Amino acid sequence: MAGATECLDEKGLPLRLKPGFGEEEKTGFPADGSADLPDLSGHKSLVAEVLSKNPGLYQKLQQRQTRWGTCLARCIKAAVDCKECKEVPGDVSLMAGDEECYETFQELFDVVVAPLQHE
């Protein structure tokens, strides 16, 4: 692709070569939805807070996926893998894998995003 720019990390290396940014999955919580939700009681993200208060929500949404194959586990992987993101106060750790995630997983996205809209 002529003229395309590539995202680089802080050392100038292509992000696509780092696990989790390219084709290779980052280790930790499986992004394919095959695992049960682990205990999130020590986690500090808004996603962990919502899922800890409503443990049935993950089970309700776990088997859903978008037309492009994005499942809930991929959207919450950062929240599960990282107990606390010190660089981001009020860390959300909820990522939409594609535009259908907002509708497909609306029960979670609405609850997590709502407090941010009032700030």
Image (tube, rainbow, N blue to C red):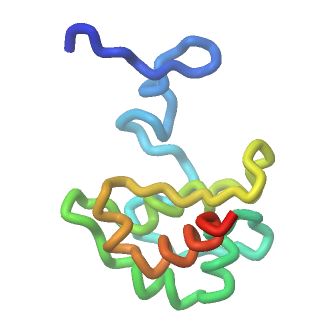
- Location of residue 118 in the rendering, given as x and y in whole percent from the top left corner: 65, 68
- Where 66 falls versus 14 (above or below)? below
Location of residue 111 by image quarter: bottom right
Asked if residue 103 is positioned above or below residue 67 in the image, the reply reads below
Q: Residue at coordinates 49% horizontally, 81% vertically from top-left?
A: 58
Quarter of the image holding residue 112? bottom right
Most distant residue in the front direction: 118
57 relative position to 115: left or right: left
* Figure quadrant of the C terminus: bottom right
Q: Residue at x 51, y 19 (%)?
A: 8
The total number of labels drawn is 0
Residue plotted at (46% across, 60% down): 75
Quadrant in which the N terminus is drawn:
top left
- At horizontal 53% and vertical 90% (from top left) the residue drawn is 56
| Residue 35 placement, left or right of 65 | right
Task: Return the residue found at the far top.
Answer: 2
